[in-house]
Structure formats: C-alpha cells, structure tokens
Amino acid sequence: MSTTGVTRREFVKTTGGAALGAIAMPAFQGGSTAVRQRRYAIVGTGVRAVGMWGRPVARGFQDAAQFVGLADINPLRLDAAKRLIGVDCPTFTSVDEMFDRARPDLLMVTTVDATHTEFIVKALDRGIDVATEKPMVIDETQCQAVLDAERRNGRQIVVTFNYRYAPKHQRVKELLMAGEIGTVTSVDFSWYLDTSHGADYFRRWHRLRNRSGSLWVHKATHHFDLINWWLDADPVTVTASAHLSNYGRNGPFRHTTCRGCPHSDQCDYRWDVTRDPELVALYVNAESADGYTRDGCVFKEDIDIFDTMNAVVTYSNGVTMSYSLNAFMPFEGFRLAFNGTKGRLEVRDYERQPWTVDSPTEIHLTRNFGRRAIIEVPEATGGHGGGDDILRNIVFRNASVPAHLALPGSRAGAMSCLTGIAARHSSDRGGTPVRIGELVKI
C-alpha cells in the first residue's frame, strides 16, 4: 500500500489495528457447505437473464442448478435465450404453466421491474423460493404485497444486490466496521452515468416510470442498498428534487428508433443495435412478437423519468446522506465520502472516462490530526466490480461467508426500494419530506 508521507508498515503501527491494506476477504471458492442441486427456472429472458443468471449458471453450476424451465411473454426471445444460454429445457409463455409442468423449487425473476411483484407472489404462493433482480418492486403497494406473501408462505426471497459483493465495496464495509473513522456522522454520495450507459436507460422500457419506477428506483436502489448496508441502518426520511434536463422533450428532434432515423447525422446519441449479435437475437429479431424496440429514441416525448436527481436521506442512526445521480455525464463512476468523528473515508471509482487512470478505484483514509493513507483495493474481474461471480457462488453453492455478507432478503429489498420510492414522491411533491414508515408496514 502506498501512502502520503508514511509507509504502509508505519501506518499500520499508528492505527493500532489490522493492516488496512490487508483486511481479510472471505474465501468464496472452496468454502461451501454441502451443495444440493435445485430445480431452477427463470422468468424474463432478456440480457440480464442470459448474461448473469443463465449462461454462467449453465456452464459453471451444473452441480447446483438444474434448468427446468424458461418463461417469457415473447416466444421468439425465449427461443433465442435458450440457444444463448445453452440449455435444453422446456420454454413457456405462461409462468403458471411453467410452475405446473416444470415444478421448480427456485425461481429467478428478471422481468420488467413493474412485473416483479406478480411473479414473486405467484411463486411464493406455490411454495417456490424466489431470487429477484433489483429493484424488488417499484411502489409501496407492490412492496407490501411481496412482504405479506413471504410472511404467509414462510418461503425465502433473495434480492440479488451484486454491488455488495464487489471486493472494493467489501473493503469499505470492513473499514467502517473496524471503526477506522469513528462514528459516521454524514455521507456524500454522487453517482455519474455517462452518455453511453446513462442514455441507454432512455432508449429502453426504463424510460417509463410505470415500468421501472424511474431511475430513483431502478438504478438508485443499488446505491441506497449499499448505504443501508455500509451504515447498518434504515432510511427514515427522504427529501428530494429531480428534473428531466437533457433527454425526452428536451431534444432538438426525435424519431421512434435509431434505426431509420432521419436525424442520425445530427444526433450525438445515435446508436446501432445491429452491431451486437446478442441484442439482435434477443430484441431485434423478436420485435414482431410484442412490438418492443431496444433502440428507442432518447428524445421520445413519452419519457417521464428523471435524468438529474438530488436527495437528502436521514437514517435511523442519525446519519444524513447527500445523494445525487446524473445520467448524461462525460464519464461514468462515483464519488463517495463518509465523514466520521475520527476522520474521513473517501472513494473515487472510475468505470469509464476519456482519460487514463492509474487505478479504477481509489480509497483514501484521513485521520483527524493525522495523515492521509491510500488504501489498497483488492483486484477483481467480472461484472459489477467482481460482485457477480461471488454472488452466484453464494446463491447456488451456499458459499460460507461472514454474517455481513449473508444474502440480502426482502427487508433489504424493501428498504432500498422504499428510499427511491420516497424520493420519487418527494420530487413529485415539490421537495416535501417523505417518511419511509408511512409507506409500508415492514
């Protein structure tokens, strides 16, 4: 670990605790308890299903997961997904038929966000355990329905918050748990989506809040879960403001899709979906079945979500967070700082930017009346900062992990969603504070 004005050895001595550059990370491979093969099915066969919960599971977890069914409302997408995943299992356009015939005991929900509740509740009422992509739900009514279904059936919901499992995020958690900055008093958190990734949300179904809950829910639920987990606290009150500043009706021109657009020569956001064979197979070739287009215009006038968001969140332990999300930046990543009674922990994460960085993630620890240390960040490969592989290993092989890395359940899913739902309500009401406890009975 390199430091400013102090060696690693000297820094470890002055802290009086564990070596900050060598905090032990859990051994996920080889730490499993006995693995049992589960009858596994997926509903919703888009990119996330194929790339995260389909192909890697089929190739690497044959001992733990037997594919017994794939379901989607689009039969053409179903056939394409089956080929891309590489499995030989039945496909269904009705989840009820899949439950009757395939008899899964674990369902992975990767559908449009607004439909998660339907499939979660149906599965629980059939005695099937559920793992769901985030966000768990998109509004408070759905949230209550899911929590009630879990209670009455005594089953288990896992919400697949892969960001928790990125080694860099685990490092932050370990530092906070060790009390390296004392008691946390406030958090500054800014997330930047660039003109590639950010724009893509405005091409897809995510552009409609009745499908995604807005980026307050679909995207920010990742970030709110991280904060809830890092602080080991619940959100209490949210005050927010948000605007649609760049996309949608703000555009100088518009078309239905990028394909065939007469303004393509003038548009900085032009994008060719046909360059990606997987997207062609799953979406372009499947359009005739349901009319869904993957390359919608980012300036469509029906866009009713926000691209510029700010919130202040108070937590059950007295901490206050200032949060922002911007969806048309020239770079991708985040800035994060925890302010504590003994110092400050800062993180700068670079995911994509038009310049070269020495390290994709920088973590700095500055003690009050002390010096600044650069904290060593564990190397990781794979999706979501290395979190995807670790999460799959826990879900399917029950890998042995410390208590703070146990799989997130419905309560974690609810708390992260409700933070975003409260922020959306507050934004719509001109910044009126919204109390989480008034939305749902947990």
Image (spheres, helix red, strand yellow):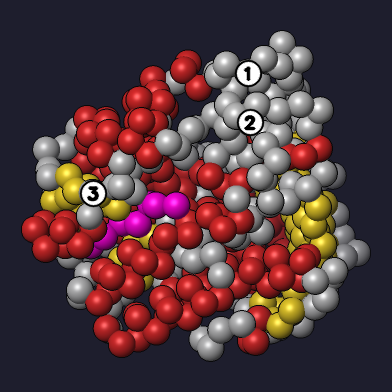
Judge whether 160 appears above or below 86 on screen: below
Along the polypeptide, which appears first: circle 1 or circle 2?
Answer: 1
Q: Helix, strand or loop at disc 3?
A: loop
Residue under circle 3? Answer: 93
Q: CA distance from mark 1 to mark 2?
A: 9 Å
Q: Residue at x 49, y 32 (%)?
A: 294
Is residue 139 magenta-colored?
Answer: no
- Nearest to the observer: residue 408 or residue 252: 252
Question: Real-space Cα distance between discs 3 and 2?
Answer: 28 Å
Marks 1 and 3, Cα distance to the nearest angstrom?
Answer: 32 Å
Residue 360 in the image: state x and y as whole percent: 65, 35
Please name the residue that numbered disc 1 is placed on: 261
What number is the disc on residue 297? 2
> Is residue 109 one of those drawn in magenta?
yes
Magenta residues, start to end: 106-112
Are the residues at dot 1 and dot 2 in contact (C-beta closer than 8 Å)? yes
